[in-house]
């Protein structure tokens, strides 16, 4: 791909101006959820190439607008449907209603909080991460933000935060038929923090999977199944990036509307540390959270690689987490034409890019779907890293990442940039939808 020039910058500015005019009309004619969006999203520009015509723009919007709004719409829907379990923090992010996370409070401080009407719900010692988290319920009638300030006043040195919910960063589309999977040797290990997976799917039936969460119940989710298949799937023409790897899969949702809370993700990270899983994929996004930050940093300090999707809120959106934490391998997505996904986040958090559109993934109940979003680019990077990093190690982990960065195809501006990071990896790892579709005939 040619590097960006002054002329291409001018063409992209012209593209942006025309796109702004087309957006209003296209919002009225695009099929599917796009027509019901509540606000005009910030739409990024494809890198390079000629200006698209309005018909092509409408097709782009058909995919981009719903996906760019997916997380916000999901959040609004949760707040509307489950007001007894979910509320919004002062910034509008979804949190578990009435719950506050207090990191390592002293016993006198905890007693003082209980005397003020707080209720102790849970206490977890995550020894693998050197963390102790206490979950309290605010006194009845207290505004949650005010209750948080009250806790901070009791012991200013102890960190207090909300129990934020982390949402999936992508969606799957049309489906195809499935067939049986051959047995294979297993050597590597990779971790997945997501929803449940369909272990009976032909692409995953022969995989060696270790599970955490939901009291041992199997609660398959479309997103978790799709991401798992990109990591370790194998079924005829379909293949994940690391099909020989053992998968350590933590279900942090358990089919609950308030699943995916910060405390759930932190416990999953502690399990990955205990099992010494070297590379962990997190295709979830949400706001910054003190517990998640500390848990992530503790894992990185121990020589693990945490790979996370940067999210699909658009190039002008605020950074999402955990991808934006220091040391995390933030992954963006590209189209088959090596253009940045217009809905993908941009910024310093982008370390690498991988295929994020027209990606074939396993579908719950059998068959395959077509996926789009940074959620599905992240496991490609995680799988590549898992092939070379076999144990957590403070020297081997950054060396493995550096090798992958150096192997990347440089796109956009020369060197690392905020759109593609160090460049595109895993291009050949994408299973084309038509390959699994052809098997039906």
Image: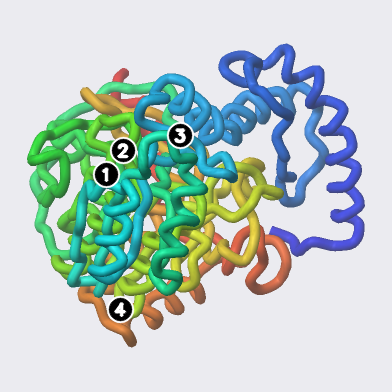
Q: Nearer the viewer, mark 4 or mark 2?
A: 2
| Element carrying mark 2 | loop
Q: Quadrant of the C terminus?
A: top left
Disc nearer the start of the sequence (1/4): 1
Q: Residue furthest bottom?
A: 395
Between the residue at mark 1 and the residue at mark 2, the CA separation in whole angstroms equals 6 Å
Say whether residue 195 is left or right of residue 35.
left
Rendered residue at 38%/60% (across/down): 292
Q: Which residue is mark 2?
A: 259
Q: Which mark is residue 68?
A: none
Tell me residue 173's x, y (percent).
Answer: 44, 25
Q: Name the residue beneath numbered marker 4.
A: 303
Query: Considering only vertical position in the picture, is 89 above or below 391?
Result: above
For marks 4 and 2 on the same chain, the one whose residue lies earlier in the sequence: 2
Badge 3: few (under 14), some or many (20 or more) residues near its Cα, within 10 Å? Answer: many
From the image, tell me which residue sits under label 1. 252
Tell me if label 1 and label 2 are in contact, CB under 8 Å.
yes
Mark 1 neighbour density, 10 Å: few (under 14) some (14–19) many (20 or more): many
Q: For marks 1 and 4, give the CA distance.
A: 23 Å
């Amino acid at each position: 791909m040619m590097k960006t020039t002054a002329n291409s910058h001018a063409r992209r500015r012209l593209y942006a101006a025309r796109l702004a005019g087309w957006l209003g009309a296209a919002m009225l004619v695009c099929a599917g959820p796009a027509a019901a969006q509540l606000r005009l999203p910030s739409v990024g520009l494809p890198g390079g190439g000629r200006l698209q015509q309005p018909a092509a723009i409408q097709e782009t919007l058909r995919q981009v607008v719903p996906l760019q709004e997916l997380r916000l719409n999901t959040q609004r829907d949760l707040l509307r449907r489950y007001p007894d379990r979910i509320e919004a923090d002062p910034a509008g992010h979804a949190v578990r209603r009435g719950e506050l996370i207090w990191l390592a409070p002293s016993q006198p401080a905890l007693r003082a909080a209980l005397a003020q009407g707080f209720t102790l719900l849970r206490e977890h010692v995550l020894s693998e991460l050197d963390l102790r988290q206490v979950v309290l319920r605010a006194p009845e009638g207290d505004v949650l933000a005010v209750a948080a300030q009250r806790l901070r006043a009791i012991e200013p040195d102890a960190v207090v935060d909300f129990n934020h919910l982390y949402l999936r960063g992508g969606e799957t589309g049309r489906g195809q038929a499935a067939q049986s999977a051959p047995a294979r040797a297993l050597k590597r290990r990779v971790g997945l923090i997501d929803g449940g997976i369909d272990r009976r799917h032909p692409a995953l039936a022969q995989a060696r999977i270790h599970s955490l969460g939901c009291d041992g119940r199997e609660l398959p989710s479309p997103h978790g199944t799709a991401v798992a298949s990109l990591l370790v799937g194998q079924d005829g023409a379909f293949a994940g990036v690391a099909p020989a790897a053992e998968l350590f899969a933590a279900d942090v949702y358990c089919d609950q509307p308030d699943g995916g809370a910060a405390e759930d993700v932190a416990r999953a990270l502690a399990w990955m540390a205990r099992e010494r899983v070297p590379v962990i994929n997190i295709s979830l996004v949400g706001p910054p959270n003190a517990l998640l930050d500390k848990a992530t940093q503790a894992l990185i300090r121990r020589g693990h690689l945490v790979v996370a999707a940067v999210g699909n809120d658009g190039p002008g959106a605020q950074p999402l987490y955990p991808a934006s934490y220091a040391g995390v391998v933030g992954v963006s997505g590209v189209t088959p034409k090596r253009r940045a996904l217009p809905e993908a986040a941009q910024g310093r958090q982008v370390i690498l890019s991988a295929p994020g559109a027209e990606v074939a993934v396993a579908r719950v109940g059998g068959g395959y779907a077509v996926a789009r979003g940074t959620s599905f680019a992240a496991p490609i990077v995680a799988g590549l890293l898992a092939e070379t990093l076999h144990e957590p190690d403070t020297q081997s982990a950054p060396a493995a990442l550096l090798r992958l960065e150096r192997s990347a195809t440089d796109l956009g501006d020369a060197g690392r940039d905020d759109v593609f990071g160090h460049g595109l990896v895993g291009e050949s790892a994408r299973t084309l939808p038509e390959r699994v579709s052809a098997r039906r005939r």
